Image: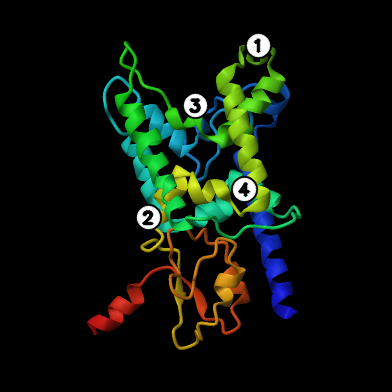
Amino acid sequence: MAGSSKLKKHSRIRLIFQACFAAISNGYIKGFSHGKIFEGGSKAVCLPGMNCYSCPGALGACPIGSLQATLNAREYRISMYVVGLLVIFGIILGRFVCGFLCPFGLVQDLLFRIPFVKKIRRLPGEKGLRWLRFVFLGIFVILLPMFVIDITGLGEPWFCKWICPVGTLEGGIPLVLLDKGMREAAGFIFRWKVLILLITLFSSIIICRPFCRYVCPLGAVYGIFNKISFYRFKIDTEKCTECASCQKICKLDIPVWRNPNSMDCIRCGDCKTVCPNKAIKFTVSNVKNRKRSCR
């Protein structure tokens, strides 16, 4: 009972943190009432999570959208600013961004709380499916914007245009509802994106964070840094009994006791909260260990 109470408290605190960060990131209230995108100076700054540039309330830019915007220019170039920010976020936080700082992650978490006949922990071929996000990153975010260009030498933001449900929810639907011109211009692509969004939202009720697991290219980038980021998990092998309580509570079905810094871990902290032996710890680096070994 004590463990259940601690988990509920932890989940509530994380939910509040997520909601506050989402509200701050999308704090341009006037945009929602007028159907206009914020164009202030902060829009040049990339936010850490998936937060669509076209959201009427967005005060910053999406790093995936910004990366595509630089790749589909006339000259093949990668913005060192965008890549640099991704590396900084990744090295410092890893997928903590996914668990605490991503508005669309919050949406999926709220939907998963809705009761359903049978929740699904894993899909058939789960291990292979989790590599799909790297396919979306490589093909739709990098290669297609760079090499599929029109007669003017410009490419398209393929992931944003054809796949991303985040942009549809945060940008497309609000703008279409608020702007008559946008409603008249909405066509096949908008309907296609709405279909993808509906599939994603319904799936989120049945399985925890399907977009994060299988599709999100930003999660793929941050996942690479999970093992080396300053913020990561460590297992105290003297306390761990390999009871697998961490894996049982993990909604992504990660064997934390065996792989505490998995690329799939979003750092929600549920495993640490329920561990009966307090064997899971947060650590910021191995600097102390290296110093000891040098003495």
Disc 1 designates what residue? Answer: 184
Q: Is residue 267 left or right of residue 179?
A: left
Q: Secondary structure at mark 4?
A: helix
State the image quarter where residue 36 is shown: top right
Per the model, the C-alpha gap separating discs 2 and 1 is 42 Å
| Of callouts 3 and 1, the N-terminal one | 3
Percent x, y of residue 128: 42, 53
Q: Position of residue 268 (x, y in %)?
A: 57, 62
Mark nearer the viewer, 2 or 3? 3
- Please state which of residues 73 and 4 is positioned toward the viewer in this rendering: 4
- The one nearer the camera, 52 or 173, is 173
Residue at the disc numbered 4: 21
Above-or-below relation of 65 to 265: above
Q: Earlier in the sequence, mark 4 or mark 1?
A: 4
Helix, strand or loop at label 3? It is helix
What mark, if any, has residue 161 been given in the picture?
3
Classify the position of the N terminus by image quarter: bottom right
Marks 3 & 1, CB-CB < 8 Å contact: no
Give the x, y percent position of residue 188.
57, 19
CA neighbours of label 1 inside 10 A, class few (<14), some (14 to 19), many (20+): few
Sequence-first disc among 2 and 1:
1
| Residue found at x 56% / y 49% | 210
Task: Tell me if mark 2 has few (under 14), some (14-19) or many (20+) residues whose alpha carbon lies within 10 angstroms of its own.
Answer: some
* Residue hosting label 2: 224
